[in-house]
Image (cartoon, rainbow, N blue to C red):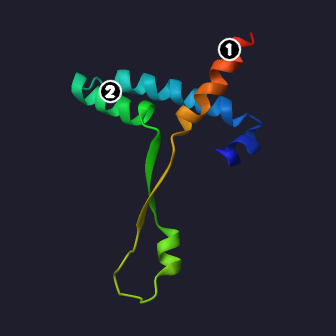
């Protein structure tokens, strides 16, 4: 988001808010069964941490080169939609 923010002159905060709106709309349009919709919503908007797959670091730290091997690791990051939430509430409160 940092690169897009710098390129287009839009705050990261605003971009995360717009992404949240679009994700919520996409979830509604997807017409998923209620149980699946709840699982997706919970993982996107309620979990404090998001998983992500590490590719570059494991490649760089790989000691033995195994043909055909694609090492990877798993990591976590703070959910940016939750991280932006207090700022979003504050920006609405100030208007």
The structure residue drawn at horizontal position 73% and vertical position 34%, both measured from the top left corner, is 10
The picture places residue 62, in percent across and down from the top left corner, at 46, 82
Measured from the top left, where is residue 5 in percent x and y?
A: 71, 41
Q: Give me the residue at 42% from left, 90% from top.
A: 64
Measuring from the top left, give residue 43's x and y in whole percent: 38, 36
Return the residue found at the far top: 95
Q: Nearer the viewer, residue 60 or 85?
A: 85
Q: Secondary structure at mark 2?
A: loop
Residue identifier under label 1:
92
Q: CA distance from mark 1 to mark 2?
A: 29 Å
Q: Which mark is residue 30?
A: 2
Q: From what the image shows, is residue 53 above or below residue 23?
A: below
Disc 2 residue crowd, few under 14, some 14–19, many 20+, Cα 10 Å: few
Quadrant in the picture for the N terminus: top right
Q: Which of marks 2 and 1 precedes in the sequence?
A: 2
Q: How many marks?
A: 2
Please state if 93 lies on the left or on the right of 31 as rendered: right
Give the residue drawn at x 53%, y 78%. Answer: 60
Name the secondary structure under disc 1. helix
User: Residue lying furthest bottom in this view?
Assistant: 64
């Amino acid at each position: 988001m940092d690169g897009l923010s710098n390129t287009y002159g839009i705050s990261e905060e605003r971009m995360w808010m717009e992404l949240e709106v679009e994700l919520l709309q996409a979830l509604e349009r997807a017409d998923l069964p209620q149980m699946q919709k709840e699982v997706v919503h919970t993982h996107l908007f309620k979990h404090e941490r998001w998983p992500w797959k590490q590719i570059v670091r494991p490649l760089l730290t790989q000691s033995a080169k195994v043909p055909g091997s694609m090492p990877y690791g798993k990591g976590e990051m703070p959910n940016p939609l939750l991280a932006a939430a207090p700022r979003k509430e504050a920006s609405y409160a100030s208007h």
